[in-house]
Image (cartoon, coloured by chain):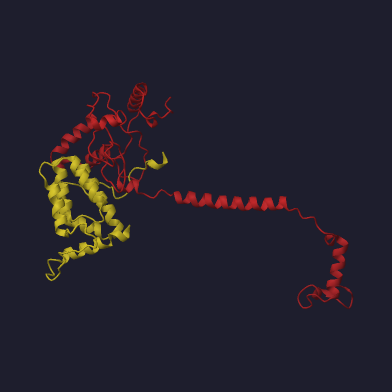
């Protein structure tokens, strides 16, 4: 599983350095298949627009989160912020925490440095909305010891 | 009757449906949640969550709920889930299940009203209570290592040892060894005499301990 996310780490690093290195031309991406020739920015824009809809409801947010979780990438901080704003609009704080937990789990599969970076990037949104990160609730360690569903 | 898990039975007969409703209500009214919201290292076993709130009228039966009614009780359906069925699940691949974990009791309704306001007003306890109302386990909990590998290793080795012992036992039973006559006392004595006469082990072995001048063992 870690092999799938190698490209996302490089993607993240290139994205942070883009303002500094103007010569970095990573706009076009060519695929072997003719499936989609969507660039990274288009992808980001599409998902941001999806979550920024003013009358989005909980159903669509959950659909979006589940769908995006299946993809072989960790969402950009902008997409994460848009999703958290959407959670705020539907007044569901636990959903926001769950989303952050999912991203934390995924990013820890890649490397230990990704999650602190993501947290740092979305900290303004977290402070503005009052969303707690999983660490603030103590959910970076297991709290309850419940029987696993597989053992029932 | 409580041991017969009716929730495992497909709802086909109206009589079974009412039995299932009865059992759901029984479960809900006699159990309480014992979740602790302290961040200590005490491990608490959570009893059944409040799935059905008897004080509320039954929820309106829409298409989603009718597929599973009354299995999910009063719990709110919030999403698509895995395949459109209103079931709860904790999966790494799909963080958002289709229903909340607990039914909306009055206590939780209060918290939800608070949730509509500023989230900075919610205390950590409130937030944790809300989370547990929507979800059964956190990511860390259901991805925690279960330690089953110790059981697997242990039982594998025990089974292996058992098989080896069984094999050995079978060989002892199936292939009995009648000792030949050269194992008898007289013949063994003769063999020893021959060994000493042939100077077997002259330096550090057998014959080194035999005194050839006196014809006895060395002192």
The residue at 24%/35% (across/down) is B77
The residue at 77%/55% (across/down) is B177
Q: Quadrant of residue B37?
A: top left
Front-most of B188 and B129?
B188
Q: Position of residue A30 (x, y in %)?
A: 20, 64
Q: Quadrant of residue A150?
A: top left
The residue at 86%/65% (across/down) is B189
Q: Quadrant of the N terminus of chain A?
A: bottom left
Q: How many marks?
A: 0
Q: Position of residue B216 (x, y in %)?
A: 87, 72
Q: Position of residue B174 (x, y in %)?
A: 72, 51
Q: Position of residue B200 (x, y in %)?
A: 80, 75
Chain colored yellow: A
Front-most of B219 and A148?
A148
Front-most of B193 and A60?
A60
Chain colored red: B
Q: Is residue B29 left or right of residue B204?
A: left
Q: Is residue B90 left or right of residue A152?
A: left
């Amino acid at each position: 599983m870690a092999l799938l996310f190698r490209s996302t780490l490089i993607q993240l690093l290139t994205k942070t350095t883009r303002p500094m290195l103007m010569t970095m031309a990573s706009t076009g991406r060519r695929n072997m298949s003719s499936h989609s020739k969507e660039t990274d920015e288009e992808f980001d824009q599409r998902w941001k627009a999806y979550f920024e809809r003013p009358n989005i409801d909980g159903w669509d947010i959950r659909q979006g989160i589940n769908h995006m979780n299946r993809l072989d990438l960790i969402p950009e901080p902008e997409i994460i912020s848009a999703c958290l704003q959407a959670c705020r609009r539907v007044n569901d704080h636990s959903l926001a925490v769950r989303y952050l937990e999912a991203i934390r789990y995924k990013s820890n599969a890649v490397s230990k440095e990704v999650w602190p970076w993501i947290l740092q990037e979305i900290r303004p949104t977290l402070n503005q909305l009052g969303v707690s990160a999983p660490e603030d609730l103590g959910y970076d360690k297991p709290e309850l010891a419940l029987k696993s569903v597989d053992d029932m | 009757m409580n041991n017969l898990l009716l929730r495992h039975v497909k709802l086909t007969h109206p009589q079974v449906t009412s039995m299932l409703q009865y059992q759901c209500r029984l479960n809900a009214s006699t159990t309480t949640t014992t979740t602790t919201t302290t961040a200590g290292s005490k491990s608490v076993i959570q009893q059944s969550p409040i799935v059905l709130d008897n004080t509320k009228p039954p929820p309106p039966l829409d298409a989603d709920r009718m597929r599973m009614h009354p299995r999910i009780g009063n719990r709110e359906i919030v999403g698509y889930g895995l395949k459109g069925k209103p079931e709860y699940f904790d999966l790494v691949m799909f963080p958002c299940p289709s229903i909340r974990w607990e039914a909306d009791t009055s206590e939780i309704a209060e918290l939800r009203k608070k949730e509509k306001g500023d989230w900075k007003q919610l205390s950590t306890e409130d937030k944790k209570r809300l989370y547990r109302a929507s979800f059964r386990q956190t990511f860390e909990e259901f991805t925690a290592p279960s330690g089953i590998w110790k059981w697997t290793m242990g039982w594998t080795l025990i089974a292996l040892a058992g098989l080896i012992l069984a094999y050995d036992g079978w060989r002892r039973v199936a292939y009995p060894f009648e000792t030949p006559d050269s194992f008898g006392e007289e013949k063994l004595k003769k063999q020893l005499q021959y060994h000493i006469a042939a100077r077997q082990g002259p330096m550090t072995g057998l014959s080194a301990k035999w005194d050839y001048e006196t014809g006895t063992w060395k002192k």
